[in-house]
Amino acid sequence: MDKLIITAAVSGSAPTRQQNPNVPYSPAEIAAEALRCWRAGASVVHVHVRDPQTGAPAFERAYFAEVLERVRAESDMLVNLTTSGFNIVAEDVGEARLMPVSLRPDLCSLDVGSLNFRGRVFINPPEWVEKASERMRQFGVKPELEVFDLGHLRQAADLASRGLLAAPPYFQVCLGVPWGAPADLDMLLAMHNRLPAGSQWSVLGVGPRQLPITTHALLMGGHVRVGFEDNLYLSRGELAASNAQFVERVAQLARLLQREVATCAEARQILGIPPKP
Ligand code: MG
């Protein structure tokens, strides 16, 4: 079994300090959370940026660049910048969403497929998905294929079969987002059984499903994503003080289950990503 890659999704675009006062907003706070997670065993940080004062979702190049620079200055952690770009107002939203790729992070998320996403519609047209994967190839950025349902996985498999994704394809199986696929073992197995041969995969579960679904992945040889983007509570009624608490818990579980946690260098090797720039 491969060593375990732990991704910390430290802020997302939705959680607020009204919900949990420990949600990081500014680039410096986001980077500090990433580094706490790195010390606890995370090898990847998934980054959204926020307005430093209000915490409103932002998509400023300078904010992404600052997080990237701060994390790279102090660690060998892999940085994964989002391209989901909710709330972007631009003439060409699809193009604006690809701005983070040009900063040459190690990875960018690539949402394959559209769905009803909480109270809105998350639109990822087929032509945008192809454009995004091509742009990531151009800049040497590894796509993390976010799939929220089985059809998304089929579309990603089609990209892989046409040679549009560098090996190994890397999936983030996103479970439990209303109204994507539910975060249960049946669904995880259904997704897992349909991954293209040779894929690497990670799973996230929303809210109280984060702990059980990531534990299943530990046993199945998958990787895991934890953090405030998906879950604010360590246990029922107990807010997490830091994203690092989730990372510590999953690393501890991995040790108990005799699954080794990957270093950042090992995570690069597993995902086919070149050494730290
Ligand atoms: Mg995200």
Image: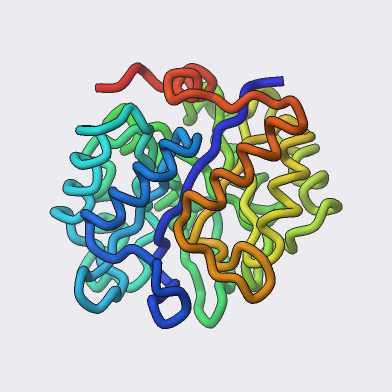
Q: How was the colour assigned to the protein in this rendering?
A: rainbow
Q: Which residue is drawn at 61% across and 37% down?
A: 251
- Percent x, y of residue 52: 21, 69
**Residue 202 as seen in the image, left or right of residue 15:** right
Where residue 35 appears, x then y in whole percent?
35, 42
Q: Quadrant of the C terminus?
A: top left
Report x, y in % for residue 3. Answer: 62, 23
* Residue under the image location 80 percent in, 37 percent down: 193
Q: Is residue 157 visible?
A: no
129 left or right, relative to 194: left
Dividing the picture into quarters, in which one does residue 265 lie? Answer: top left
Q: Can see residue 34?
A: yes
Q: Residue furthest left?
A: 62
Residue positioned 86% across, 52% down in the render: 186
> Can you say whether 131 is above or below 94 in the image?
above
Residue drawn where x is 56% and y is 32% of the image: 5
Q: Looking at the picture, does residue 207 appear above or below residue 226?
A: below
**Quarter containing ligand 1?**
bottom left
Between residues 269 and 89, which one lies in front from this camera angle?
Answer: 269
Which quadrant: the N terminus?
top right
Front one among 150 and 61: 61
Q: Nearer the viewer, residue 61 or 150?
A: 61
User: Toward which corner of the image does residue 94 lie, by quadrant?
Assistant: bottom left
> What count of labels does the image hold?
0
